[in-house]
Amino acid sequence: MRQNSADLNRIQLHGSVEAAPVLSHSNHGVEFYRFPLSVARLSGAEDRINVVAAKALLDRNGPLSPGQELTVQGEVRTFNNRTGVGNRLVISTFARALTEEEGPDENRLELTGTLCKLPSLRTTPLGRTICDMILAVNRRYGRADYLPCIAWGSLAHRCGELEVGDRLRLNGRLQSRVYTKTVEERLEERTAFEVSVMSMGPWEEACAAGAD
């Protein structure tokens, strides 16, 4: 299923920093820090997106503080949390560039990838049609990110007709959703992240547009 070249994985966010960066992890001697970015939707709701950035990138931009407006350019990354604490699948935005600037909130995501699980088409209690699916997005060097995606209405019906192995191009946004889970007879509030699909086309369109 995996290809030799990387898929398109491009996200641009503009929002407000909610908290100062804290150490996330170290890799090959490089420290990475994590901070939450609040991004407003047109509906007035807000998505709280976790951003991960290398210390060197943060140092070039100076200290980040709550309330600061910021544009983030990068890609969506996933990893499996094996600690048993919190969500099993952790999804964040890996920052390639940070810019302190004012402007309207933005949440724009472009992806190409391979459908790696049969889509699940369902209807909500209010009668809305939803389709859930998992898109495998290849990085370079043989790794991949597995992104949960959700589509609504007529687009959901189109997604429901797809098959495992189909190559797709998606445009949408990375959104957060708060839910409660029962853990050892107590309720815990958790946050799930998923790609809200706004438009979809065949992977060949991405090739024609020069995506790598």
Image (cartoon, rainbow, N blue to C red):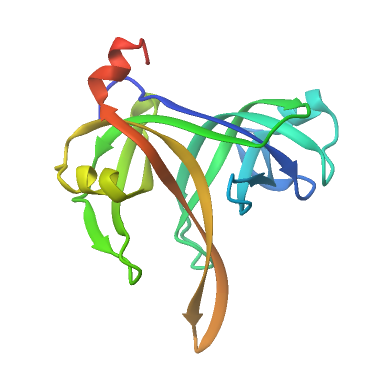
Q: Residue 206 falls in which quadrant of the image?
A: top left
Residue drawn 36% across and 23% down? Answer: 6
x and y, in percent, of residue 127 in the image: 30, 65
Q: Report the number of numbered marks.
A: 0
For the N terminus, which image quadrant? top left
Residue that appears at 63% across and 40% down: 52
Up the image or down, 85 lies above or below 177; here it is: below
Q: Is residue 189 left or right of residue 202?
A: right
Q: Is residue 150 above or below residue 69?
A: below
Vertical position of residue 182 compared to residue 6: above or below: below
- Residue lying furthest bottom: 185
Which of the two residues, 167 or 56, is positioned nearer the viewer here? 167
Q: Which of these two is toward me, 136 or 10? A: 10
Return the x and y of residue 193 as percentages of the image width and height: 49, 53
Q: Quadrant of the C terminus?
A: top left
Relative placement, left or right, of 77 versus 154 is: right
Residue 162 on image: x %, y %: 16, 42
Q: Position of residue 198 (x, y in %)?
A: 40, 38
Q: Is residue 53 left or right of residue 172?
A: right
Apparent side of residue 3 relative to residue 148 in the rendered image (left or right): left
Please report the residue visible at 31 percent of the width from the left and 39 percent of the height from the top.
136
Residue at position x 29%, y 11% in the image: 208
